[in-house]
Image (cartoon, helix red, strand yellow):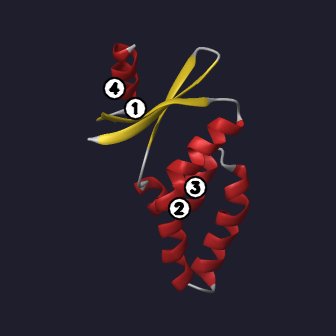
Amino acid sequence: MKRYAILIKEGHYVSVKQGWSWPGFFFEGIWTLTKNLWTVSIFVVPATILSLTAFPFLSMGISLICGNWGNSWVIDDYENKGYRIIRDGIQALTPEQALEKYKGMK
């Protein structure tokens, strides 16, 4: 089971996985772009390209950083957009199941 944080803004709920991000680890630059993490992408995308062309040893470091902090960046991005965390640590298999569990607790 995975752990999820539930966030709300104006009656709209979202759930975000907490902890390690495998997509962030394997697809760091593309993943940050698909999650609309523009501030992070400004640094990660060029660093990824540079690491693949000139400094291959940096690639693992970038992957580890994105894997470790990726989901936290997504939560921070939602908070910057006005969402607030109303519950964290909900155990579920999917984000949808986490939302269902939370709504069942209310």
The residue tagged with tag 2: helix, strand or loop?
A: helix
- The amino acid type of the residue labelled 4 equals Gln
The quarter of the displayed image where residue 98 is located? top left
How far apart marks 3 and 2 lie (CA) works out to 11 Å
In percent of width and height, residue 88 lies at 44, 35
- The amino acid type of the residue labelled 3 equals Ile
Q: Nearer the viewer, residue 105 or 66?
A: 105
Q: Is residue 1 visible?
A: yes
In percent of width and height, residue 106 lies at 40, 13
In this rendering, position of residue 6 left or right of residue 95: right
Q: Residue beneath label 2, please?
A: 66
In this rendering, position of residue 90 left or right of residue 27: left
In percent of width and height, residue 102 lies at 39, 21
Q: Residue beneath label 1, please?
A: 95
How far apart marks 2 and 1 lie (CA) works out to 20 Å
Mark 3 and mark 2 lie on one chain; the one further toward the N terminus is: 3
Mark 3 and mark 4 lie on one chain; the one further toward the N terminus is: 3
- The amino acid type of the residue labelled 2 equals Cys
